[in-house]
Amino acid sequence: MMYSIDSLTLISGIDVPIPEIGVNIHQPTIREIAYIGEKSFYEAAQTIIIQKKDFINGLENITQEDKIALSQMSNFEIFLKLVEANPLSSTKVQMLLSLLFPDFNSSIEERFIYLVNPKEQKSILINDSTFEILQEVITTILCLQSGNTKEEFNPQGDRAREIAEKIKRGRERAARLKGEKKQQSNFLSKYISGLGIGTNTLNIHNVLDLTLYQLLNQLERYGLYTQYNISIQAKMAGAKDVEDVDWLKDIENK
């Protein structure tokens, strides 16, 4: 079950409290995401929300023994191995964490993510027991797609190092999930341009100040409103069997 966040909280763009972790997560705007770049942003996001089932299915020529060993790892352990195997990926993830937790300095340690707020002298540990909550929240506020599975495994010794090597070789395949497919088409730039031109009230500058949830919500609502106007014009022109469009219906951006 996906972590529940109130729709008003999402559409308002405010920071989202995560009581289980003891921290608020920031909903980054498109303008803030631009500092990282769309491609790096989605690569980092996809790394954080990695699901071991998707990861294992993305590996080629994997033995049954390795498959079993990987299936016994948690999402967090897979995540740690991914960033350990690829320093560039680790850098991109830290950049994303700086957007999500702007008041904190972050570091990815051997068994946890460490967040420190130097001004308030506050520290947060995100470990195996809370990481999947973070995954679900990030999935929701960034409008991604994820599942939720968790197993326990102790990644120590030679066997773990072998698994880490397989993770390193398979990371490019594992990255080909929904988030990367989106960034390959530069969909953010395209949607920002389209929404700015298509509406009478928005332009590129204020669209850039929307969060991802707000952007996709407005796009879907604008699409419904456009369909509604077309249906009304068709009826006024004498067209029959025109389907009614409820442009104020409930919509979800996940």
Image: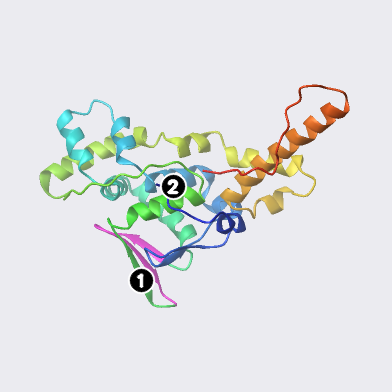
Q: Nearer the viewer, residue 19 or 98?
A: 19
Spot occupied by residue 32 in the image (x, y as percentages of width and height) = 57, 55
Q: Residue at x 43, y 57 (%)?
A: 97
Left or right: 38 in relation to 145: right
Labelled disc at residue 123? 1
The kind of secondary structure element at disc 2 is helix
Q: Between residue 227 and residue 86, name the one nearer to us.
A: 227
Q: Residues within 10 Å of mark 1 (few under 14, many from 20)?
A: some
Q: Which residue, given by chain and number where applicable, does mark 2 sit on?
A: 45
Identify the disc placed on residue 7.
none
Q: Does the residue at mark 1 contact the one at mark 2 (Cβ under 8 Å)?
A: no
Residue 96: say if magenta: no
Looking at the image, what colour scheme do you see?
A: rainbow
Identify the residue at the far left of this view: 158
Q: Which residues are magenta?
A: 105-119
Looking at numbered disc 2 in the image, what kind of residue is underneath it? Ala
Determine whether, in the image, residue 145 is placed left or right of residue 150: right
Within 10 Å of the Cα at label 2, are there few (<14), some (14-19), or many (20+) other Cα atoms?
many
Q: Secondary structure at mark 1?
A: strand
Disc count in the image?
2
**Residue drawn 28% across and 39% down?**
168
Q: Main secondary structure of the magenta part?
A: strand
Above-or-below relation of 122 to 58: below
Examine the rendered structure and indicate whether residue 213 appears above or below residue 241: below
Q: Quadrant of residue 23?
A: bottom left
**What is the three-letter code of the residue carrying label 1?**
Ser
